Amino acid sequence: MVKLSIIAPLVYIVVLVGTLAVFSFLYRKRKANKAASLEPWFGPHYSRDIYLTLLHQENPKVPDSILKAALVRRATEDVRRVVTIRQAKSSLQQLLQRGSIGDDLWTRFTAAEAEIDEELKDVAMEANGFGSEWSASIFQTANEIVQATRIRERAAEVAEQAAAERAWWNEKRERASRELLGENNSDEDGVLVESSGPRGAARSGTTTQRKGKNAT
Amino acid sequence: MAQSSDVYIVAPIEMDPTTKTIQALPSSSNPFLARELEALNNLHRTLKSVPEITNGIPPPPTSVGPKRSAQIERMRQTGNAAFKKKNYSQAVDLYTLAISMALTRPPWEPSALLREELQQLYANRAQAHIGINNWPEALADVNASIDLKRVGNPKAHWRKGKCLKEMGRYEEAKEALEFGLEFGNDAELAHMLKEVNGILSKRQ
């Protein structure tokens, strides 16, 4: 009886703790699996992979100048991601409070945020490895590159847009002149343009003054 | 999920030992990787081509190569001079040249400078196009100028209204002029808006 009275509580405790431990283990494993199966916020970070691959390439060794350029490219992508994260954060927080988005999305977001913090620190460290103080300016440089890329993309659209507008305008003029031909059967090609010509010229004369005044 | 900071995916790339360019292995056909590699090689080449950069590190965006700025400015002045002499197509060519010069600025230079130059050049080129009744081209140029600088750019807003009006797109002209007036009152913008409104009401 004495023996049993000691064993009984011990067995009870062991079974209880054991069950809890197994439950906790399984629960955590499932949660980790679920988190790991969540889609990452951003796609693959190519410039990071390229930089690290080049850094670890041995035969032949990649010259520093290429590594530096690759690091700048990596910082550029990071800046783009940081901007995306910052822009999304406040609206996502609001949506989460209102219950419009699920916890999964928020988990993905915070994970991406933590990841980018880590990434920025890593890039700053690498930059300082190449030249002291470079970490102070590498992200500024990267930011300018991001902006300049956007401006260049806009500039590239100009020619396309001009061609499209030109095609539309030519067609419109042709249609107008065909209608005119149909109506009067006369050969007054491009009447529409002609009529706007003098007005246009007169107006552009005045704007010459405008420009002359302000041209610097 | 979260990529740990010491883990990376080995990219299928190699270095050409003679040209020192990085290229994808023939087995890879990822267009994103190819684009990134192209950007990397371009950046590397640009960094190498600037003689002031000796350590391969782009200078902080506080410094600007003075030579290119001066060249662009000179080209713009020549364009302005041609415009004043009413050599509009010549002015268009000169502004085009200045634009392509501005676009070859090294990407790490202050982007605000590039933006300022381009909005000005596009607005000027639009005006030259307007001089020879090239409304479609002028419209494309002012659109770019306005996208680059909305506030304090009434001339571009005016020219946009002008182009649309001349092409008979009065509704759009009205919208463009009203949009321009949102950024501050301008007598000439208001004047043209009145004209356009007059035409629109007459049509109805």
Image (cartoon, coloured by chain):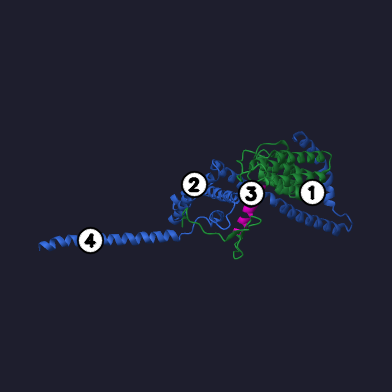
Compared with A53, B65 (above or below) is above
Q: Is residue B47 magenta?
A: yes
Q: Residue at x 35, y 60 (%)?
A: A27
**B150 or B63, nearer to the observer:** B63
Chain holding disc 1? B
- Position of A38 compared to B96: left or right? left
* Location of mark 2 (residue): A121
Q: Tell me the residue that label 3 is attached to.
A: A149
- The correct choice, above or below, for B168 with respect to A37 in the image is above
| Residues behind callouts 2 and 1 on a single chain | no
**Could you say where residue B11 lies in the image, as x and y percent from the top left?**
55, 59
**Chain under label 3?**
A
- The x, y position of residue A130, in whole percent, is 55, 45
| Residue, disc 4 | A14
Using the image, name the chain to which the residue with label 2 belongs.
Answer: A
Q: Point out the tag, 2 or 3, that comes first from the N-terminus.
A: 2
| Residue situated in front as seen by the camera: A103 or A40 | A40
Label at residue B27: none
* Mark 3: amino acid: Thr
Residue located 79% across and 55% down the image: A170
How far apart in space, not on screen, are marks 2 and 3 (Cα)? 24 Å
- Mark in front: 2 vs 3: 2
Q: Which region of the structure is painted magenta?
A: B32-48
Same chain for mark 2 and mark 3? The answer is yes
Crowding at mark 4 (Cα within 10 Å: few <14, some 14-19, many 20+): few
Q: Contact, CB < 8 Å: mark 2 with mark 1?
A: no
The residue under label 1 is: B134
Q: What's the distance in space between the residues labelled 3 and 4, CA to CA?
A: 65 Å
Q: Residue at x 50, y 48 (%)?
A: A122
Amino acid on which disc 4 is placed: Val
